Image: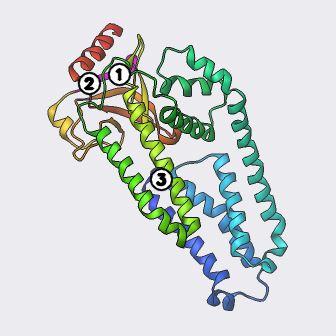
């Protein structure tokens, strides 16, 4: 593991060498001149590079090892081989590349089954959310996991569902009482400024761009519309989700951007030393701080006994050992946490 960690960028360099060497060999005039008349051994070596070694180096670089990832990357290597290697040279090995493409197609179909399961159980998921006392931003993903197997595509769909829910369906909701993270900052004002800038930019250049580059104008229009929806959802989700606590845990979210559940029994202690709070946060620390021109320092850092899983945008999950918080009522939040910790001990 030490070698994998220290050689992180070496693996990326090796992957780059594999791709560039094979491109030069088959797609440039220099490469065609050095290919021998009997090129089958060379082609076989290229297939080993693209289907086995390339995926291996990529997984070493990302430190992400799994059978599913290996199959997807190997299948991608098969597709890349069909693009890079001329068909007459690849003909003796066509079965290998088609098998890889078929494997990728099978995995895609398998992933789509989870998507179908999500929409099939959506009415039951919504019903479960309505009966749950947790905020929607926590109860909805929990209900999804209850009916649909934990899956990255499902996480993305769940995340996007929350975006559209908060942007379009949450306007009649009244913000509940609780400790907020944004009211003493200009975060929401900055979001509104960004929405205004996107709308002005869209109206200013869209029609001109449409006359000259129609496809590009449509793509940018879709991206701008989604950006506005996302920013509105960000504002609403932050307003409607103050810090929530029950007897066992504290639920902290910064809107749709990130959220975390912390069991009180897993809290080791609170870090409140002025020097520690003003120093740069470590990589194993997730922050719940309203970003402004000057993000400021946290009021406290929760040190965990063991890493806790946080959910980021697009449903990405990552473990952190510390949680930095800057709230609108730090004294009250500190009292709640300390009271629960002392009660549990």
- Residue 106 located left or right of residue 272: right
User: Quick check: 280 above or below 182?
Assistant: below
Viewer-nearest residue: 116 or 39: 116
Viewer-nearest residue: 49 or 187: 187
Distance between the Cα atoms at labels 2 and 1? 8 Å
Mark in the foreground, 3 or 1:
3
- Residue position for label 3: 224
Query: What kind of element bears circle 3?
Result: helix
Distance between the Cα atoms at labels 3 and 1? 41 Å
Q: Is residue 257 visible?
A: no
- Residue position for label 1: 267
Q: Which residues are magenta?
A: 263-271
Which scheme is used to colour this image of the protein? rainbow
Q: Residue 314: x percent and y percent?
A: 52, 42
Q: Is residue 228 visible?
A: yes
Query: What kind of element bears circle 2?
Result: strand
């Amino acid at each position: 593991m030490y070698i994998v960690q220290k050689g992180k960028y070496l693996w990326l360099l090796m992957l780059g060498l594999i791709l560039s060497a094979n491109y030069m060999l088959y797609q440039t005039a220099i490469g065609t001149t050095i290919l021998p008349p009997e090129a089958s051994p060379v082609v076989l070596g290229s297939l080993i590079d693209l289907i086995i070694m390339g995926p291996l180096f990529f997984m070493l670089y990302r430190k992400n090892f799994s059978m599913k990832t290996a199959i997807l990357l190997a299948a991608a290597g098969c597709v890349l081989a069909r693009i890079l290697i001329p068909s007459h040279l690849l003909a003796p090995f066509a079965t290998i590349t088609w098998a890889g493409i078929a494997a990728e197609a099978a995995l895609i179909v398998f992933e789509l089954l989870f998507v179908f399961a999500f929409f099939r159980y959506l009415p039951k998921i919504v019903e479960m959310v309505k009966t749950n006392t947790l905020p929607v931003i926590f109860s909805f993903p929990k209900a999804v996991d209850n009916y649909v197997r934990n899956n990255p595509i499902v996480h993305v769909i769940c995340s996007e569902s929350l975006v559209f829910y908060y942007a379009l369906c949450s306007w009649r909701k009244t913000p509940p009482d609780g400790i907020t993270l944004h009211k003493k900052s200009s975060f929401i004002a900055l979001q509104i400024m960004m929405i205004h800038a996107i709308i002005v930019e869209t109206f200013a250049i869209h029609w001109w761009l449409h006359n000259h580059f129609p496809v590009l104008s449509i793509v940018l229009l879709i991206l701008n519309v989604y950006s506005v929806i996302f920013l509105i959802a960000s504002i609403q989700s932050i307003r409607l989700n103050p810090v929530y606590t029950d007897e066992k845990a504290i639920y902290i979210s910064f809107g749709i951007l990130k959220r975390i559940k912390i069991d009180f029994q897993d809290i080791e202690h609170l870090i409140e030393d002025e020097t520690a709070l003003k120093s740069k946060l470590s990589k194993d620390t997730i922050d719940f701080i309203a970003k402004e021109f000057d993000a400021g320092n946290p009021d406290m850092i929760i040190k965990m006994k063991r890493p806790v899983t946080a959910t980021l945008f697009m449903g990405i999950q990552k473990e952190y050992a510390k949680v930095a918080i800057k709230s609108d009522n730090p004294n009250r939040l500190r009292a709640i946490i300390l009271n629960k910790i002392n009660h549990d001990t």
